[in-house]
Amino acid sequence: MRPLLEDYAGLRRNLPHITFATLPTPIDYPDKFAQELGISRLYVKRDDLTSPHYGGNKVRKLEFLLARAQADGARTVITFGGAGSNHALATALYARELGLRAVSILMPQPATDAVRRNLLMGHKVGAELHLCEDRDTVRRALAEVLRARRAEDGAEPMVIPLGGSSAVGTLGFVNAALELCAQLRTDGRPEPERIYVAAGTLGTSIGLALGLAVAGSDTQVVAIRVTEPDIASEECAQALFAETAALLHGLDSGFPQVVFRPSHFTLRHDFFGTGYGVYTPADQDAIRQMREGAGITLEGVYTGKAMAALIADARNGVLRRGPAMFWDTYNSRDFSDQAALVDYRKLPEAFHPYFAETEPAK
Ligand SMILES: *Cc1c(COP(=O)(O)O)cnc(C)c1O
């Protein structure tokens, strides 16, 4: 089910798409947990279950991104992220399914088990991993990789931006919003008053906001910023919205010309803590409550912070009216068995400190 393609013939014709995800993802209605939080109703959109192999929010973006790479004749996809980037790992995993080479250009991030697991898995699925200490080094590494890949591939590699949040990647969440509206109609449930979702590079939250505008929904998107303010800002949000809307309208002139609604999109800055990838007491507490209350596993970089915002608003009485939705963007498929088979010494040496007893220098 891809309502975006079903509803718009021009998009079906002009927009490359490959199916990776099993959609629609379920919606949970944990009523008892909602009561414990002091809200009338809680919905949980289980995008942790987008795929039996590797779930989370990146799968929806990659259906459009990698289809575009393939349509353009690319042999290699190059992307970016923190050392433990879920996006870089998901890209490498699904690129391999298509026979595309994946290059991940990564930057330092606090070393955690999740980071180590993603690094090992990235290596296992054949990603070429680079560690760069700052943005200048990233630029240099990209130039070098591009030169080498052009020569070897005889084709232009596709460069996928941080988090997969180009206009093309964002389409995955325009579709997700339409999917949600259809699902709620079928379930006979009222639309949520608010959707709480983690915001890294904004493709997820802005795609949802755009799709909800297209559907004429009154639901507000509450995007909890977990990255540095220059990566997720109000300006970036509006620019990505406009770019995605223009892309859709350009591919299908029948696609509604929606505009960004400031009243329906809030970027929250109050759960960021001290840095990207740094856990906060509030997110650790939210993770525990979600596990005990709804049996759902979150993590501390993204989803714990988004859930902490929902819980805080529930406690402060902000969520008394309609249902609140939590959009679970975290891959819940456990691949630690496979990661455990990888010897970290096979990774480029720059990554070895992540596996040492002590924390690597930041
Ligand atoms: C990447 C990621 C996000 C952020 O999504 P954006 O579209 O970049 O805002 C949220 N949660 C998890 C678990 C992620 O891996």
Image (cartoon, grey):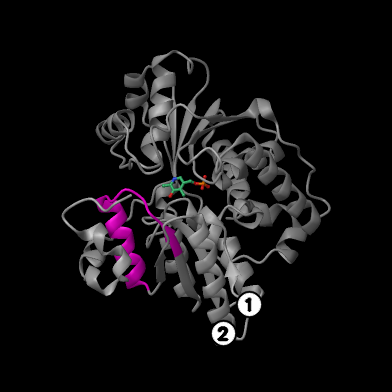
Name which residue lies at 32% across and 30% down: 286
Residue, x 30% and y 63% (percent of image)?
351
Which type of secondary structure does the marked residue at label 2 adopt?
A: helix
| Rendering coords of residue 75 (x, y %) | 56, 79
Q: Secondary structure at mark 1?
A: loop
In the depicted view, which residue is nearer to us: 212 or 261?
A: 261
Q: Residue at x 22, y 60 (%)?
A: 355
Image quarter of residue 188: top right
In the image: residue 305, left or right of residue 197 = left
Q: Residue drawn 37% across and 44% down?
A: 277
The residue carrying mark 1 has its beta carbon less than 8 Å from ligand 1 = no
Give the residue type that dot 1 points to.
Answer: Glu
Measuring from the top left, give residue 159's x and y in whole percent: 58, 66
Instruction: Report if residue 108 lies within the magenta region.
Output: yes
Q: CA distance from mark 1 to mark 2?
A: 8 Å
Name the residue furthest right: 253
Q: Return the residue at label 1.
A: 156
Residue 18: image quadrant is bottom right
Q: Residues within 10 Å of mark 2 (few under 14, many from 20)?
A: few
Q: Which residues are magenta?
A: 105-125
In which quadrant is the N terminus drawn?
Answer: bottom right
The answer to whether residue 74 is above or below residue 268 is below
Q: Is residue 29 visible?
A: no
Would residue 202 be seen by someone viewing this image from the given angle?
Answer: yes
> Foreground residue, 142 or 265?
142
> Can you name the residue that lies furthest to the left here?
357
Q: Which residue is mark 2?
A: 153
